Image (cartoon, rainbow, N blue to C red):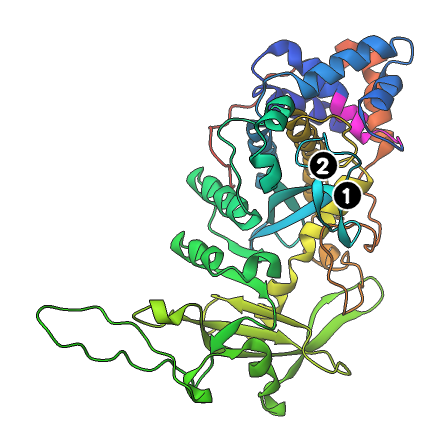
Amino acid sequence: MKDELQEFERYLEHLGGGLGHADRQAGLRGYCIGLMAPLARKSVEPMAAHLAPQATRSRHQSLHHFVAQSSWSHEEMLRRVAQWVVPAMDFGDGGWWIVDDTGFPKQGEHSVGVARQYCGMLGKQDNCQVAVSVSLACVAGSLPTAWQLYLPQQWADDMARREKAGVPENVSFATKWQIAQAQIEHLVEQGAPKHTVLADAGYGVVTAFREGLTAMGLTYVVGVTGQVTVWPPGHAPLAPRPRSGRGVVATRQRLGDARHERPLSVKEVALGLEPTQWQSIEWREGTNFTLRSRFARVRVHAAHREHLRTEQRAQEWLLIEWPEGHEEPMKYWLSTLAENITLERMVFEAKMRWRIERDYQDLKQDLGLGHYEGRNWRGFHHHASLAIAAYGFLMAQQLRQPEGGGKKNSARSEEPALPTHYKPRGSPAHAAPRPIVDHNFAAAYRRSLAQDAAALPMLPARKRENSFVTQ
């Protein structure tokens, strides 16, 4: 335990190097310990009462100031967390960027970004905040590396509410896929590795999102709905009409009236496949049984606004899941993974998106990600980055253990055996519990500070370059 406590102190010193002022180190330490404590509610007041029972009011004020008013950068905090955790991640069996969004139910209309919108925790439209994130994942673990509140149009256009909530002037309305694309662009600019991007159909159906990933040199496996159209083998737009006249004139593709001259929905493609094209694939061991389903794939060209194009898009994979006993296909993915990739590997990568659901589960259930009760932009992002900071230390410790979470086989057995029809969106309610948080550690750290501050000297932070450390 002593070694872990000293490692945690070094970790806090590393994070504190990005806070701007040395006196913010106490706020960082207290907030992270509060988030790791066995509290039912991890908002500022109960954390203050837990940390300082005899001086709750003053501790409440200091923690509130640290999280809601201090001007340190939450993006710098996330970058430093990644610098610490990523070297512990093993990318020998692959690495992935996982895009998703998650909701936080909220009452009223004054908390920044609150609006009636889809909330994954509730599985329906309701009053909530929604944040977009990008996680870096390996087989054994994952870590959120980018986090931003989605600001609905009515908030983005309301200058009075923006000012009251402290929304930065440079933040304008952006769709969720645009936020995610900007996050990935920023990570790549920082030197992050160009791993495959995974996302659900909320992002995958957007042609511009997929094309943006390709433009950045990134491969992807993204969900799509059955209505998305493609050109399967034997189907193509009509050749452009020849133009006469001087010079070279760009001509556009044409759509005909016959079925073979129009794109098909991916559902139509799936229903038209031969029985021999379907295979039963196992992709991971669940908690109680092997996860298995029936899959098929076919090479296609994505179809979108073909009449505005002069040539077809590049060929890619359409992956389809149709479990035995289901009346119709259940899931569809478009992917730019290599043409020679095996079906087993493609299914494995498509299914790796479960990692981000694990992130959300641990962050919400154990680290109070959704417990912030403030209303402003800065506090919302500060609180989330600190929850991720606490999670990052625990994840790094788990990944570095010689036996346990850092082993690939152990990680494979962690995935909850979810029903095949279940499609989670940031909700932890349906996932099997995983005790990543050791509350005894937080208690021991508090005791060590109270009993003998000299037992944990403030060690100098290890020097790290201002970039996204990948190894």
Q: Secondary structure at mark 2?
A: helix
Rounded to the nearest angstrom, the CA distance separating label 2 from label 1 is 8 Å
Q: Quadrant of the N terminus?
A: top right
Magenta stretch encompasses residue 424:
no
Could you tell whether 24 is left or right of 215 in the image?
right
Image x and y of residue 319, in percent: 57, 73
Image x and y of residue 197, in percent: 53, 55
Q: Pick the residue in front: 441 or 242.
A: 242
**Residue assigned mark 2:** 391
* Tally of numbered tags: 2
Q: Pick the residue in front: 443 or 309.
A: 309
Q: Are marks 2 and 1 in contact (CB under 8 Å)?
A: yes
Could you tell whether 289 is left or right of 7 in the image?
right
Magenta stretch encompasses residue 36:
yes
Q: Give the class, few, some or many, for how many residues have Cα within 10 Å of label 1's Cα (few <14, many ≥20).
A: many
Residue 166 can be seen in this image: yes
Image x and y of residue 401, in percent: 72, 42
Image quadrant where residue 84 sits: top right
> What residue is shown at x 57% (from left), y 19% (from top)?
17
Image quadrant where residue 161 sits: top right
Magenta part, dominant SS: helix
Mark seen at residue 362:
1
Q: Pick the residue in front: 41 or 117.
A: 117
- Judge whether 446 appears above or below 179 on screen: above
Could you tell whether 222 is left or right of 193 in the image?
right
Q: Secondary structure at mark 1?
A: helix
Q: Tell me the magenta residue range.
A: 31-39
